[in-house]
Amino acid sequence: MEIEFRNINKTFGTVRANIGIHFSIPAGTIQGILGENGAGKSTLMKILSGYILPDSGEIYLDGELAKIENPADAIRYGIGMLHQDPLDFPPMKALDNFMIGKPGSLFPARREAERAFLELRDQFGFTVDPNSYVDSMTVGERQQLEILRLLWLGVRVFILDEPTTGISAQQKEKLFLTLRRLADNGNTVVFVSHKLEDVEALCDRVVVLRRGELAGQMTPPYDTDRLIEMMFGKVIKLDERLPCSATDQLVLRLQNVAIDDYRLQIRNVNLEVRCGEVIGLAGMEGSGQELLLRACAGLVRTVGGRVIVNGKDLTGKDTHSFMRHGVTFMPASRLEEGLIPGLSINEHFILTGEQKGVFIKRDKAKSYSQNKISEYSIRGFPESRVEALSGGNQQRTLLALLKEELSLILLEHPTRGLDIESTIYIWSKLKERCAKGAAILFISPDLEEILQYSDRVIVFFSGRVSPPLDATLTNVDQLGQLIGGKGWEEIFEKEQVGVSNAAQ
């Protein structure tokens, strides 16, 4: 299906999200939509998929004017969207989610649906179990489920909004194979991203948005510097790797820690984390790194060993005890765990701040919020509701909410949904915290990010936990091998040799 945007405009209050957007997407291609956070990418795709209406402009499908006023209209036209945060129902089974939205009788035929589910799953080589609950599935599996659902609904245009955020390298490879297959079968794929390497590896053509306007278009071979310049108006390079600023003072000590989960067990984790140190946790989603990070925040109880923070044994204590000792945790699920939909940015700063007296000083709080908005380059206002912000700006808001005096910062995907400029800026702010004595443990599916910003790296594989690896002596290929389950004997042999040499 060929898609043509004609002079699309959309405004939210004083924010001009889309300004006169005009371009075409040929049928059977993978079209990249590239841009910085807040460039208007998601807004344009939500207009195409019927989630929001444009202020003006038209969409033509195969040369015919389309009237898309809601998602049901979009589905009838054959257009479906996989959102950055999956719009599924976690307490329900995969098959129940698969059947949602299918027209028919009040009591759908489950056997027919399950047969269609299995046929489509096998056709694309997916691994989703129709009887598994969605809340037990990885992000990659939830993406597979949504693709299957859209295929069953007859979708021919697949819109994916930041689909590689929060998935592993292996899951990304699988996703790309699926998208290429969809395009080869005549479907149109619209791939929305801020990640240059993903767009260059996958897309047949790219359009770039900047501050709501069309900044340019490009076809292979891609000029990376030119794409960056179109995105930001300037060429941006990664900063040089900063040396470790760790001291001898311990912030966190894990002694023979054991954690049980219904899917896996973690045993005998021993780790010492020093002030100023950054430790990256690498592994496929569901390999145990999320469990360990949450155990260090008091959100998951350990079943063995000790968790010591700043010399205080907090084993078995609740998360408030950890917070009182300078520990903070930032989750990957922004709106489910990190922010409160319905509240403004200003109200979030009021809730997380320390209030003196009985009454809230709203003028002072608003001024503080505005300063934080400027400091973290959040595209919004103190009165903006957090659910109205783009994913990247929600992420910046979460980071801006972190308290100043912290000794241990635990982060799930700290740069999730952020463009390269924002990533560099956020890590500069986090490194400032390290210089003041805070230690950081973070999870990221981006191995380049882990090696760029970590002092040491810990790898997880099916509950196994590696000894800490020096990030300066490790490369992406080695991490990829370990994440895939290879080379574990060698790293444990090296650790034993190191312990023996130290003892001598």
Image: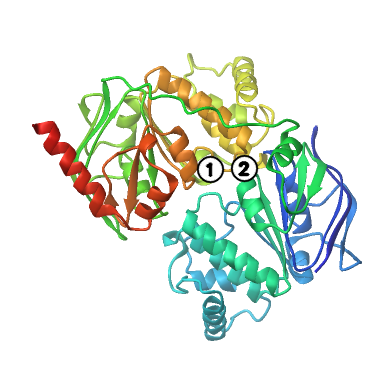
Q: Could you tell me which secondary element the residue under label 1 belongs to?
A: helix
In x, y percent, where is residue 301? Answer: 26, 44
Pick the residue in front: 51 or 180: 180
Looking at the image, is mark 1 or mark 2 earlier in the sequence? 1
- How does the figure colour the protein chain or chains? rainbow
Real-space Cα separation, disc 1 to disc 2, in angstroms: 8 Å
- Tell how many labels: 2
Q: Secondary structure at mark 2?
A: helix
Residue 385, compared with residue 61, is above or below; it is: above
Q: Is residue 444 left or right of residue 9?
A: left
Name the foreground residue: 357 vs 239. 239
Question: Which quadrant would residue 438 be assigned to in this image?
Answer: top left
Mark yes or no: residue 469 visible: yes
Residue holding disc 1: 334
Residue occupying image coordinates x 65% and y 58%: 202
**Image quarter of residue 408:** top left
Identify the residue shown where x is 51% and y is 50%.
166
Q: Amino acid at mark 1?
A: Arg
Asked if disc 1 and disc 2 are in contact, CB closer than 8 Å, the reply is: yes
| Residue 35 pos. (x, y %) | 71, 42
Q: Mark 2, residues whose alpha carbon is within 10 Å: few (<14), some, or many (≥20)? A: many
Left or right position of 500 against 22: left
Residue highlighted by disc 2: 391
Q: In what quadrant of the picture does the C terminus appear? A: top left
Residue at x-position 86% and y-position 53%: 23
Q: Position of residue 387 (x, y in %)?
A: 63, 42
Quadrant into which the N terminus falls: bottom right
From the image, state whether disc 1 or disc 2 is nearer to you. 2
Label 1 neighbourhood size at 10 Å, few (<14), some (14-19), many (20+)? Answer: many
Q: Amino acid at mark 2?
A: Gly
Residue projecting furthest to the left: 504
Q: Is residue 218 left or right of residue 167?
A: right
